[in-house]
Image (cartoon, rainbow, N blue to C red):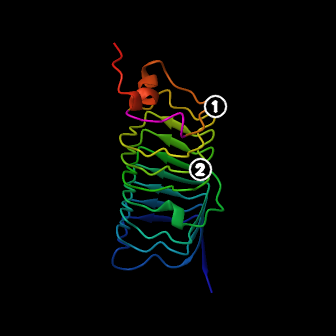
């Protein structure tokens, strides 16, 4: 039987030693918690906020995230494709998601704001209507990705091959166009 937790604030807990109890968490706020290398599998989070938490390499297999926001979190090496993909909008603000993977996921309408997204795997991912606001996308992988109407206007360091990704109506600045031409090894002055 699963426990139900609503409207709870959980501050400075170390879940590396003792696991977060399995359950359904609704409108809960996790502040300064440690989850690195921990187990967050088979959980259900609805309208929750993770703030200044470290989830590096956490196991999120079969976990549901619905209307969840991550603020100032370290989410390095997370395999989001292992979670239950029947979720609604996620938001990432001021977080480090480097080396994470969204392989073959539907991430449409997601907000990434002020995030470090180095070497993130977005291959075959639906990123339609996603906003990459002030994000660093160095070495992020876009291959077979659906980027229709995605907003890269304030994103930096991205490399996208238009012949391998759907970019119809995606937004870029003139300066950002270099990221679309990188494969041609041309000099733009």
Q: Quadrant of the N terminus?
A: bottom right
Using a 10 Å C-alpha cutoff, classify the residue at mark 2 as few (fewer than 14 neighbours), some (14 to 19) or many (20 or more): many
> Which dot, 2 or 1, sits closer to the camera?
1
Q: Is residue 149 left or right of residue 98?
A: right
User: Where is 106 relative to 65, above or below?
Assistant: above
38 or 169, which lies in front?
Answer: 169
Q: Residue at x 58, y 35 (%)?
A: 150
16 lies above or below 64: below
Relative to 178, 102 lies left or right: right
Q: Which residues are magenta?
A: 157-164
Q: Which residue is mark 1?
A: 168
In reply to whether residue 127 is colored magenta, the answer given is no
The C terminus is located in which quarter?
A: top left
Instruction: Tell how many labels.
Output: 2
At horizontal 50% and vertical 74% (from top left) the residue drawn is 41
Residue behind mark 2:
107
Residue 16 in which image quadrant: bottom left
Q: Is 160 included in the stretch rendered in magenta?
A: yes
Measuring from the top left, give residue 105's x and y in whole percent. Answer: 58, 56
As helix, strand or loop, the secondary structure at mark 2 comes to loop
**Percent x, y for residue 134?**
43, 33
Q: Which mark is residue 109?
A: none
x and y, in percent, of residue 77 in the image: 38, 59
Direction from residue 76 to residue 101 in the image, left or right:
right
Residue at 62% x, 62% y is: 85
Residue 78 falls in image quadrant: bottom left
Prevailing SS of the magenta stretch? loop
The picture places residue 151, in percent across and down from the top left corner, at: 55, 32
């Amino acid at each position: 039987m699963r426990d139900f937790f609503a409207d709870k604030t959980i501050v400075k807990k170390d879940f590396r030693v003792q696991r977060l109890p399995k359950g359904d968490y609704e409108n809960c706020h996790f502040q300064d918690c440690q989850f690195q290398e921990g187990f967050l599998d088979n959980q259900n989070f609805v309208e929750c906020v993770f703030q200044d938490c470290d989830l590096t390499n956490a196991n999120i297999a079969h976990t549901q995230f619905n209307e969840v926001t991550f603020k100032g979190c370290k989410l390095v090496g997370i395999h989001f494709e292992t979670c239950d993909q029947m979720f609604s909008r996620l938001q990432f603000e001021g977080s480090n998601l480097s080396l994470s993977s969204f392989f073959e996921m539907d991430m449409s309408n997601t907000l990434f704001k002020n995030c470090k997204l180095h070497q993130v795997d977005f291959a075959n991912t639906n990123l339609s209507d996603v906003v990459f606001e002030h994000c660093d996308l160095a070495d992020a992988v876009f291959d077979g990705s659906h980027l229709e109407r995605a907003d890269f206007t304030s994103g930096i360091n991205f490399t996208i091959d238009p012949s391998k990704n759907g970019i119809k109506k995606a937004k870029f600045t003139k300066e950002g166009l270099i990221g679309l031409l990188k494969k041609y090894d041309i000099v733009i002055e």
